[in-house]
Image (cartoon, rainbow, N blue to C red):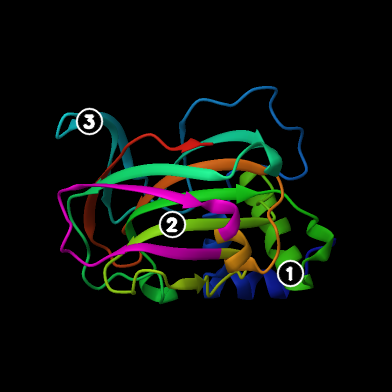
Amino acid sequence: MRLNTPLVHRIVRLGSLGGVLVGVLGCTTAPMPAADTPWTMQRLPGKRTTEYTPALRAGQHCTQAKANRSASLWRRVLRREPESWRSLQFSWWVDTLSPEATVADTDRDDASARLVLAFDGDTSRLSARNQMLFELAHTLTGEAPPYATLMYVWDASAPVGTIITNGRSDRIRKIVVESGSERLRHWRHYERDAQADFLAAFGEAPGTLIGMAFMTDADNTQTQVEACYGPATLR
């Protein structure tokens, strides 16, 4: 696809690309690695980086995330066919929330804790606008965004169970699994039927899982937040 330069400039001015770049966890066109890659920090163009470091929180080993007006991912590339797994278990400890942040508003789209899943699929089915965004993201990062990205988030205000479509790319959907400050500074553990969640969010069955990431961000609200992530496992 040939990039439409005026449209590209308009997309960048509106910040539409930011929503797509959050989903850059694996490449749908490049060869997949022979084995799962180690967890590494993934920068987002034009963003300050969140600090991810090993930590111990309430007796549990975890990855500590400190965001200071920043946004980046702690991610790994993998490959899991749909028939090889269904259940997802993960845990996190959130120390602070930004009260004005919510994933329901594109201008305030920050979250103290997110678990992000990236899925492969037939990108030829995407709209012309999404294909344009994907190609632009590929040009800027060297990686093609996944066909679909599903996030589990701790939001400051959106009700638990809410499914939110990203305002800048409908290929990113978010499920609120925790809300508000009542359970701050406690470990929260979750087990999700992630394939059923994908079907509820996108209206279709998921393809191959190609990436997983944690993300703590505070770039839109220009605030500081902190969280800690336990292991994420598939069964």
Between disc 3 and disc 1, the foreground one is 3
Residue position marked by numbered label 1 in the rendering: 5
Q: Outermost residue toward the top? A: 34
The correct choice, above or below, for 48 with respect to 42 in the image is below
Quadrant of the image for the N terminus? Answer: bottom right
Residue at the image point whose x is 59% and y is 35% from the top: 77
Q: Is residue 194 magenta?
A: yes
Q: Position of residue 7 (x, y in %)?
A: 70, 74
- Residue range of the region highlighted in magenta in the rendering: 173-196
The numbered dot on residue 60 is 3
What's the amino acid at mark 3? Gln
**Residue 195 as seen in the image, left or right of residue 73:** right
Q: Position of residue 35 (x, y in %)?
A: 64, 22
Tags 3 and 1 touching, CB below 8 Å: no
The correct choice, above or below, for 187 with respect to 199 in the image is above
Q: Say which element carries label 3.
A: strand
What's the amino acid at mark 1? Thr
Q: Say which element carries label 2.
A: strand
Q: Residue 82 occupies which quadrant of the picture?
A: top right
**Residue 18 as seen in the image, left or right of residue 131:** left
Q: Position of residue 98 (x, y in %)?
A: 22, 65
Q: CA distance from mark 2 to mark 3?
A: 21 Å
Q: Say whether residue 235 is visible.
A: yes
Residue closest to the eye, 101 or 203: 203
**Residue 9 as seen in the image, left or right of residue 212:** right
Q: Say which element carries label 1.
A: helix
Tags 1 and 2 touching, CB below 8 Å: no
Residue position marked by numbered label 2 in the rendering: 152
What's the amino acid at mark 2? Tyr
Q: CA distance from mark 1 to mark 2?
A: 34 Å
Q: CA distance from mark 3 to mark 1?
A: 50 Å
Residue at the image point whose x is 21% and y is 70% from the top: 99
